[in-house]
Every structure is written in C-alpha cells, then in structure tokens.
Amino acid sequence: MTGKNRENYNKNYIAYVNSFDPPTKHFKNCFRAFMVGGLICCIGQFIRYMLEGVVGLTGDELAGATSIVLIFLGVLLTGLGVYDRIGRNAGAGSIVPITGFANTVASPAMEFKTEGMVYGMAAKMFIVAGPIIVFGVLAGTAVGIIYLLL
C-alpha cells in the first residue's frame, strides 16, 4: 500500500469509526460539571459555617473537621450508590472536590471486598487513588524543599 492510499484508508477508517459515535454535547457537559462541582463546594462551605458557628471550631481544627465531614459524605453516598448516579450525570464536576477522592477510594474497596479483607479490599482500595496520593506527596515534598531553600 502506498503512502497516499494508506492516508486515504486512515481517513476513511476514522470517518467510519466517528459515524458510530454520538455527538458530544460539550457545553452541556461543562455546565453540568460546573454546577455539580460548585454545589458540592457550596455544601462544603455550609458545613464549614455550621462547624464554625455551632461547634465553635476555628483554624486548622475547622479545616480538618470540614474535610472529614466531606470525606464521610462522599464515602456514604458511594456506599449507598448515589455518588455513582451523580457522577454519571455530572462528569468531572463530581470527581474534582474532596468527595470525589473519597469516592475513588471507596468504590474499588466495595467492588473487591468479596476477595477478602487483605487481598481484596485493602489491596485494591488504592488502585485509582494510589497514583494521586503518591504524586501529591511528591509534589508537596518538592514544594516544601523549594520553600525551605528560598
């Protein structure tokens, strides 16, 4: 097959494959992601205000408690099957906040719990979230070293 024929073949193949793909609704998907991600952040801000006003937390305790409540809600909604439905409709808007990270840890743990506590749940829990944790720790360490040197 010559170069020109191969190029035409590739174009025809790509056109054939694209004919089976439904058109992507970029604006609608971005709008949903923005709205759901924003709603999750608003819920987090509400929790923060409630912990500050009702419980009287401030500073690091307030930030930590807010994060713990959001992680708990993410894991709870994942366990109830609600977070997956939110993710199907919201796309990236549901995976960006801290609740999405909790979902990425809880989902594989639930999926592989039939394989046992150690080789199933504990080993598979960080399949998706593991690289995020590793690169987050490495990036934090690098920034800390740079900050120390400056």
Image (spheres, helix red, strand yellow):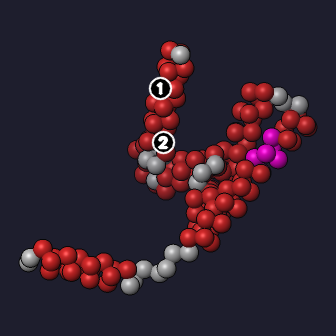
- Residue 74, horizontal then vertical, whole percent: 66, 51
- Residue 129, horizontal then vertical, whole percent: 49, 45
Label 2: which secondary element: helix
Quadrant assignment for the N terminus: bottom left
- Residue 145, horizontal then vertical, whole percent: 49, 19
Give the number of the mark in front: 2 or 1: 1
Spot the residue most to the front.
Answer: 4
- Residue 93 position (above or below residue 70): below
Q: Amino acid at mark 2?
A: Ile
Q: Is residue 97 magenta?
A: no
Q: Nearer the viewer, residue 103 or 44?
A: 44
- Residue 62 position (above or below residue 102): above
Q: Main secondary structure of the magenta part?
A: helix
**Which residue is denoted by mark 2 in the rendering?**
132
49 displayed left or right of 135: right
Q: Is residue 54 visible?
A: yes
135 displayed left or right of 77: left
Region in magenta: 43-48
Q: Are marks 2 and 1 in contact (CB under 8 Å)?
A: no
Residue at x 84% of width, y 30% of height: 57
Residue at x 62% of width, y 57% of height: 94
Q: Nearer the viewer, residue 143 or 117?
A: 143
Q: Nearer the viewer, residue 66 or 146?
A: 146
- Residue 145 position (above or below residue 108): above
Spot the residue most to the right.
Answer: 54
**Which residue is denoted by mark 1 in the rendering?**
142
Q: Amino acid at mark 1?
A: Ala
